Image (spheres, rainbow, N blue to C red):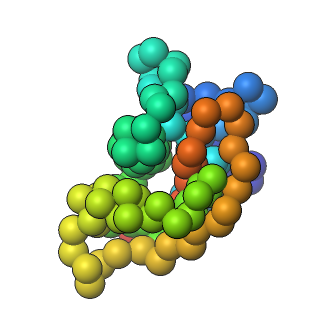
Amino acid sequence: MAGGRTIHVEGFSHQNPIPSASRVGGLVVSTIIGAVDPETKETPASLDEQCALVFANMQRILTSAGAKTGDIVKVVIYMEDPGRQDVVNAHWVKLFPNEDDRPVRHTHRETLAGTRLIAADFVAVVSD
């Protein structure tokens, strides 16, 4: 990747040789972020716990990329049941408490692997 770098996060990986994110200049783009616990490699059963893990994994990727939550400009959420966005919203306002400084968000209905109920990806712009 010309002028960029691959971001790897300990305990977060895909079955395929795909990095957690890529950074080129100030642009950081993640891969799909699942609700897998980095220590146990398990996915909890509840949507609430899965949301917490997706957002925690997102923060871990940001940190590894030298970015922070406030650098995110767009988040895409993939859900088995988008009608349950109230659960996501509870975690969303914790991660982005300032309503005047939140990224855009789009939610897709998606059939996810195994017991996964939610996943996400993001785009961030880091101003150095």
24 or 12, which is in the foreground? 12
Looking at the image, residue 58 sits to the left or right of residue 7; the answer is left
Residue 91's place in the image compared with 18, above or below, is below
Residue drawn at the location 56% of the way across and 72% of the way down: 106
Q: Does residue 26 appear anywhere in the picture?
A: no
x and y, in percent, of residue 24 in the image: 61, 58
**Number of marks in picture:** 0
Residue drawn at the location 29% of the way across and 60% of the way down: 90
Q: Does residue 94 appear anywhere in the picture?
A: yes
Looking at the image, residue 56 sits to the left or right of residue 1; the answer is left
Residue 127's place in the image compared with 45, above or below, is below
Considering the image in quadrants, where does the C terminus appear? bottom left
x and y, in percent, of residue 84 in the image: 47, 61
Q: Residue furthest right?
A: 16
Q: Residue furthest bottom?
A: 100
Looking at the image, residue 99 sits to the left or right of residue 88; the answer is left
Residue 115's place in the image compared with 109, above or below, is above
x and y, in percent, of residue 121 in the image: 58, 55
Q: Quadrant of residue 13?
A: top right
Residue drawn at the location 21% of the way across and 75% of the way down: 98
Residue 25's place in the image compared with 73, above or below, is above
62 or 97, which is in the foreground? 97
x and y, in percent, of residue 53 in the image: 41, 39
Q: Quadrant of residue 113?
A: top right
Residue drawn at the location 37% of the way across and 57% of the way down: 87
